[in-house]
């Protein structure tokens, strides 16, 4: 196990392909993973997204966390919309994403 020997108070980043893993297990795990980086949903490659106004995609009916940053009890998951595609070779309204995250010591 990758977290063996890591203290609960240590800042931990977990990479988990499917964001439903965070919802089902990670956000309540005793190891207290502070940040989970995920992807998998691709925003369903279809939706409407206007920052600060609307963020909708049919994928939200399948995944609670499907694009962007989500928080629960001081634990975060960031779901990247991805750069590629699955099945349909394109995107409508959900732009490809490469995420840059800058961490600062608190």
Image: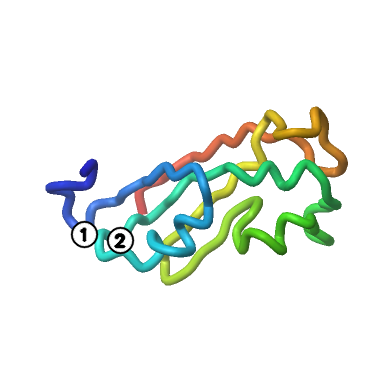
On screen, residue 70 versus residue 46, left or right, reads: left
Secondary structure beneath dot 1 equals loop
Closer to the chain start, of discs 1 and 2, is: 1
x and y percentages locating residue 14 in the rendered image: 38, 46
Residue, far front: 87
Crowd band around label 1 with a 10 angstrom C-alpha radius: few (<14), some (14–19), many (20+): few
User: Which of the two residues, 98 or 23, is positioned nearer the viewer here?
Assistant: 23
Horizontal arrangement in the rendering, residue 106 relative to residue 62 (left or right): left
Specify whether 49 is left or right of 2: right
Find residue 44 and report its horizontal and vertical position in percent. Answer: 74, 46
Q: Which corner quadrant of the image does residue 16 belong to?
A: top left
Residue pictured at 52% horizontal, 57% vertical: 20
Callout 2 secondary element: loop
Question: As displayed, is residue 69 above or below residue 92?
Answer: below
In the picture, the quarter occupied by the C terminus is: bottom left
- Up-down: is 58 above or below 80? below
Residue 4, percent from left and from top: 16, 47
- How many angstroms separate mark 1 from mark 2 (CA)? 6 Å
* Of the pair 96 and 90, the residue shown nearer to us: 90
Query: Could you say which is closer to the camera, residue 35 or residue 65?
Result: 65
Residue receiving disc 2? 32
Q: Quadrant of the N terminus?
A: top left
The picture places residue 86, in percent across and down from the top left corner, at 70, 34
Q: Which residue is mark 1?
A: 8
The structure residue drawn at horizontal position 71% and vertical position 60%, both measured from the top left corner, is: 60
**Residue name at image x 83 percent, y 50 percent:** 47
Q: Residue at x 45, y 58 (%)?
A: 22
């Amino acid at each position: 196990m990758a977290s063996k020997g890591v203290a609960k108070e240590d800042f931990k980043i977990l990479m988990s392909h499917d964001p439903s893993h965070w919802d089902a297990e990670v956000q309540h795990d005793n190891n207290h993973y502070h940040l989970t980086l995920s992807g998998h949903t691709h925003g369903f490659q279809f939706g409407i997204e206007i920052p600060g106004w609307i963020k909708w995609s049919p994928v939200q009916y399948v995944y609670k966390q499907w694009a962007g940053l989500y928080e629960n009890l001081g634990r975060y998951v960031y779901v990247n919309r991805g750069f590629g595609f699955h099945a349909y070779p394109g995107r409508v309204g959900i732009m490809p994403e490469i995420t840059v995250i800058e961490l600062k010591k608190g």
